[in-house]
Amino acid sequence: MKSHVRLDPHCGQAMTEYVVVLLFVVVALVAATHPSSPVHALVAALKDAYAAYSYTISLSV
């Protein structure tokens, strides 16, 4: 039994459009130079979490 899958040619165009929009959003988030940008907030949160984690690990029991 052969299974032939026919893809709609518009499927590829929609995927390309999604990728372009997603790349635009990512570039906009990363390129933001304002100190309260989402990327800066994420980096600060990760630094705080790692500092607390490394302090806890350094404590001897």
Image (cartoon, helix red, strand yellow):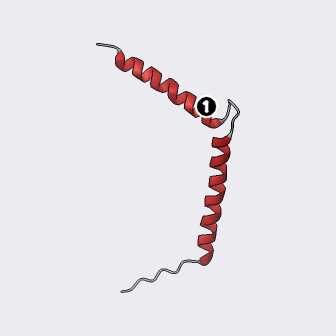
On the image, the x and y values in percent for residue 23 come to 62, 53
In the rendered image, the quadrant that contains the C terminus is top left
Q: Could you tell whether 61 is left or right of 51 in the image?
A: left
**14 to 39, vertically: above or below:** below
Q: SS class of the residue under badge 1?
A: helix
The foreground one among 5 and 13 is: 13
The foreground one among 26 and 56 is: 26
**42 to 18, vertically: above or below:** above
Question: What residue do we see at 67% from left, 52% from top?
Answer: 24
Q: Could you tell whether 53 is left or right of 31 in the image?
A: left
On the image, the x and y values in percent for residue 41 come to 61, 31
Dot 1 crowding, Cα within 10 Å, few <14, some 14–19, many 20+? few
Question: What residue do we see at 57% from left, 28% from top?
Answer: 44
Q: Quadrant of residue 19?
A: bottom right
Question: What residue do we see at 61% from left, 32% from top?
Answer: 40
Q: Which residue is mark 1?
A: 41
On the image, the x and y values in percent for residue 18 come to 63, 60
Q: Amino acid at mark 1?
A: Ala
Residue at the bottom extreme of this rendering: 1
